[in-house]
Each structure stands twice: as C-alpha cells, then as structure tokens.
Image (cartoon, helix red, strand yellow):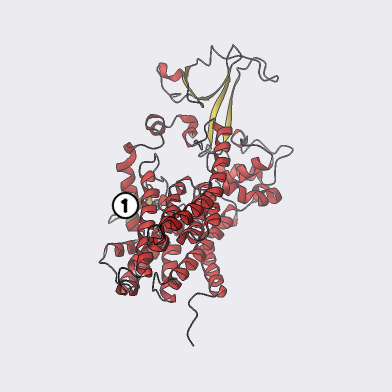
Amino acid sequence: MQQPAHPSWRRYALVALVVSAVYAAMSGPFITQPSPHFHFTDLANSFLHGRVDTDTPRRHARGGERPGDPPGYMAAIARATDNGKNGWNDWASYRVLVLKGGQEVRGVFPFLHDKGPKKKEFWTVDGKSMVIDVHKDLKKGCNPNRPHARCDRVEYKVSFPPFPAVVLMPLVAVIGYNTNDVIVTLLFGALSAVLLLMWLARLRREGLIHHSRADQLWLVAMFAFGTVAFYCAIRGAVWFTALTMGVTLHFGYLLAAQGARRPLLAGLLFGLGVATRTPILFAGVFFPLEALFKDGRWLGGLGREGATDAAKRIALFALPAATIGLVLAYYNYVRWQNPLEFGHFYLLEGTRAPTRDHGLFNFYFLNHNLSAALTNLPRLSLSAPYLQITRHGLGILACTPALFALFGGAVVHPSDEAGPQSLAYLRRRSLVRNLAISIVCVALPALIYQNDGWQQFGYRFALDFWPALIGLFALRVGRLSPTVKALIIVGIIVQTFGAVTFGRMEWFYYD
C-alpha cells in the first residue's frame, strides 16, 4: 500500500518528542533551574503589575527578602549576580534628573567615564544635548527620606522586545521567578522542528520538492541538531530564548505566507515575530512577494483581477502586522520617548563606546561582523585543549558545512523537465527567489549591527534567517546525496560539541 503523501500527526508528535528529549538531555544541569538571565521573567512580572520599568537591578543578592517579593525573586537575583560577585548584564537604564529650576530631564551621560569636559555632556531621551554638572545644577530634596540628596535617580528597563515576556506571564503569575525559562525555550525549539516538517510535507504535496519522507527527516535533523539552533535552544537566558522563539514564529509565518494563502495568520505571526526578534521585521518582504507573484507569475497572470486579489491579501496581512507594530511603537515611546527605540542604546547607561560613537547600525561594524558570520574557524594547536573557538563564534559554514551544497550545480527537478511554463516550475523558481530575497533582507542589517553576537559558539544571529535558509536549501539541493548526508552528520557533530561545551567548558573558548 502506498504511504500517504504527508506525515500523520503521530509522526509530528514523534519528532516533537525526539527533539525535546535530545534537547533536554543535552541541556543537562541547565534544565534543572531557571537560567541566570531572567530578563523576560522580570518583564513579565512588571507587566503583571502594570509597569514597564523594574527595580530589580537595584536589589542586592545579600539584601534579604522584603515583604511582597514574588516567589523565587531573591534566588533569581543570586543566580544573576553570582551571589553579588558580578554586576547586572544587559539591563538598560537612564538617569532622571531634576534641575534647580524644577525641570525634569531623562537621559544619559554617554561620556561619563571621560576625564575632560565631555563628562558633563547629557543626551536626553528625546534627542537633545545639554551640559549638566550633577554637583552644581541639580535640585535637592526630592526624596523625603533623604532631604539633602540630589534629585538624581536611575530608571531600569528590559530593552529586549516584549513578546517572550507576554508568553511567560501566565507562568510568572502562578510561580513567580521560579518560572523555568529553559524548559519553555526548549519546547519552542522542538516546535520549530515540527513546523519545519509540516512545511517540507506541504512543499512535497505541492510538487515543489521531491524529497522522500526519510530525506525530510534528514533536513529536520540538520536544522534541529546541525545548526546554531541546537546550542541556543537548550539553555534559556534572555538572548537565546528570544532567538529560539523567533525561529518558531518565523517558521509559522512562512507556513502561512507561502502562496499568500493565509494573510491574517501570516500577519499575526509576523507581527509577533517582530515583537520577539526585531530583525524579523525585514522578513516582511516575503509575504508581498508571494502575493504579487501568485502561482509564480506576476499577479498570478490575471492582470487587473490578480492585482485586486494581491492588494486584498496584502491589506489583510498588514492589518494584524500594523496593529502589533503600533502597540510596539507605543510601548517604545512610553519607555524611551522614541517609537523606534527598543532600548539597546541604553545598555551600560549609554556609555558603550561603539554604540555611542557609531550608533546601533553602521558600516563601521561590517568587516568584523562578516568574519563572525562567515569565516571564523576554530583554532587548532598541539597542546591542550588542542581546539579553541573564539567567543565571537564560528562562521555559519563551519557550523553547518552542508550549506556548501548550495554552491553546487543546478538541481534538475521533475517540474523543470515539464518545461519553464509549467505551474510547478514557475512556483518553485518564484519561491526560491522570494526566500533568497528574504534572507538577504534579514541578514544585511545584522551585518552592520553594533554587536556580532559576542559570547556565542556559532553566529547566533543567523537564526533570524535560518527558517528561510532551510527552505531554500530544500528547494535548491533536491534529493540528499550521500555526500550531503555526510556533511549534515559533520554539522551535527560540530553542534553537539557546541551544545556540550558552550557555557560549561570555558577552556575551549578564547576572547
């Protein structure tokens, strides 16, 4: 009897179970408690109390509990600061000053550590520049408990996009800071593998790929265990949680957006993706392309009727996406008086020199980021530990060598043999183009971003475009040869090494 063309729900469940089990096993001690970097849990708690700021970085691990502290709060602070030995990592903040004339200003001293006159330069959150001497120009007496203290306080906020915190809110409402973000992250990682298998099954049903069911599982294994998705999904922590959740939403978006078939769902998932990982914003180009090139032809080959259909689908897509975008813009404005600022400029209170001097995005960062993204290799030696990896991370080809197959000769599909006018041929070529454009649109801003992903095993920002890249790989590479499978296995070995050692065996890493 011929097997069904698509996996049954049992097969999806089995993939979810296997990926979850492997991730949990490789997570090891990480999974036994919440991660030390609990920004999303803290933000969820703030939301539950109607706030967009937090007092957490004011607290000290040895300060003791206070009445009203949520469950697990002091334990979380102790983990984050190693019982007070370390400072707070990646919390955004600015100063709130009241001048002698009564004017309140919010902003940062970006040259705070300068020994010259620039030390007094103050940049307000609404883009103004002032000169303020905190010893002479500030009012006193704002705090009734400290009547002689200057009116100078710090406001702390979580700069990362908020949707992961929204996901955690029900858990935080019940169990507080004992919420295990590692398990949540791990489950999203497994869900991504299931969504990928669903997408591959649909592509095969539509005649766009011709991989066997076994080859589809090879592709799922390649993504789940042979890319940076592996080491990111098993550890929780704010950065890796956002990346992993972003991948899941991106896969869901691609499923709904392919063929522009479900515009409202695609717009919703896209908007939530942006609310999780801002770079997904640039993947928004994929849906309009799919709508404009319906069935692989401009406006579906239907002229005015096709234009009307495309406009309707794009409008439906834009409705939830724009709604979420407006909510995010308002959220940013409330926090930073700038609808386009998520707050990364305010890490280290705006004193981080590269960001201060060059902004968040600048071609100044391109050369260094290209190395992190593409060319970084492990360092080999004849003495222990014999192999070391820069904390800027391995390049994407070193992480996932199967990608070399993309540079091979053109793959002949049955749809190609049917001729360039066949519907399957047109749809596959159009989808290849649209995915490639989406990848470029997401990757390019990351390459001029002020951070290359520092403190990573592999170039983790690649996860923002990996969903489109694995789809392109399936379309471009075709049936998997023994050589490609061997490269997939090499990638799994590489990523397993990263999953085992990163954050645990520091002797394998160098600055």
Q: Quadrant of residue 448?
A: top left
What residue is shown at x 47% (from left), y 69% (from top)? Answer: 202
x then y, percent, for residue 287: 45, 54
Foreground: 146 or 345?
345
**Residue at left offset 50%, top offset 80%:** 4
Which residue is at the front of the view, 454 or 244? Answer: 244
Q: Within 10 angstroms of label 1, few (less than 14), some, or many (20 or more) residues?
A: some
- Indicate whether 201 appears above or below 109: below
What is the quadrant of the C terminus in the image? top left
Q: Residue furthest bottom?
A: 1
**Residue 385 rendering spot, x and y as whole percentages:** 35, 55
Horizontally, residue 409 falls left or right of residue 461, namely left
Report the amino acid beneath label 1: Leu
Residue that numbered label 1 is attached to: 374
Residue 241 % position (x, y): 52, 51
- The front one of 120 and 194 is 194
Q: Does the rendering let one see residue 47?
A: yes
Furthest residue to the front?
Answer: 304
Task: Label 1: state its secondary structure.
Answer: helix
**In the depicted structure, whether residue 9 falls above or below residue 24:** below
- The answer to whether residue 385 is seen in the rendering is no
Q: How many marks?
A: 1
Q: Which residue is more in the foreground, 458 or 32?
A: 458
Q: Quadrant of residue 215?
A: bottom left
Q: Residue furthest right?
A: 67
Q: Position of residue 288 (x, y in %)?
A: 44, 52
